[in-house]
Amino acid sequence: MGDIIVRRVYDDGGQVEGAAFLVDGMWPRGVRKEDLERVRWVRDLAPSAELRRWFGHRPERFAEFRRRYREELDGEADAVRPLLEAARHGPVTLLYAARDTEHNNAVVLREYLRDRLAGPDG
């Protein structure tokens, strides 16, 4: 099983390890598609617009955001599958645009993927 790396799309010139996935619902501002040509955009795995607006990147809401987002991910088995497969075969990089490096959807998604990989079906 490969490592799952979480990296801000604006850092390190978008350097990625292994299979790379942009996990935001909107394309990152100021980033050209050519700059991420090796990156697969999985917007189906982004939090719903309603959840994103409610969270508003407020750290005090992160625990509840995590719970709700994980529920949304449970309903996206087909969209999660390629990330799980990639992680079984090597490193995976999850790219996101948020400024907060600790309280964002990519952190929750990495947790979710690791839990799924460690589970009985992993």
Image: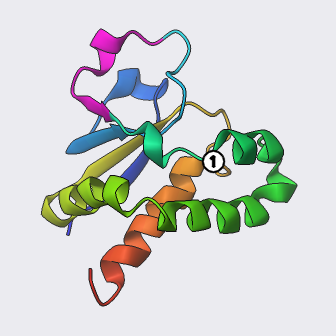
Residue 49 lies, with reference to residue 103, above or below; the image says above
**Residue denoted by label 1:** 104
Q: Is residue 6 left or right of residue 38?
A: right
Q: Is residue 57 left or right of residue 49?
A: right
Which residue is located at x 31 percent, y 30 percent?
15
Give the class, few, some or many, for how many residues have Cα within 10 Å of label 1's Cα (few <14, many ≥20).
many
Residue 34 lies, with reference to residue 113, above or below; the image says above
Q: Quadrant of the N terminus?
A: bottom left
Q: Is residue 81 left or right of residue 1?
A: right
**Residue 82 pos. (x, y %):** 24, 54
Front residue (pair 6, 45): 45
Q: Quadrant of the C terminus?
A: bottom left
Q: Secondary structure at mark 1?
A: loop
Which residue is located at x 46 percent, y 28 percent?
9
Front residue (pair 57, 69): 69
**Residue 64 pos. (x, y %):** 77, 65
Q: In the rendered image, which quarter is residue 67 located in?
A: bottom right
The reply to whether residue 35 is in sight is yes
Q: In the rendered image, which quarter is residue 41 located in?
A: top left
Residue 52 lies, with reference to residue 76, above or below; the image says above
Magenta stretch: includes residue 32: yes
**Residue 100 pos. (x, y %):** 68, 40
Q: Which residues are magenta?
A: 31-40
Outermost residue, right side? 60
Outermost residue, left side? 89
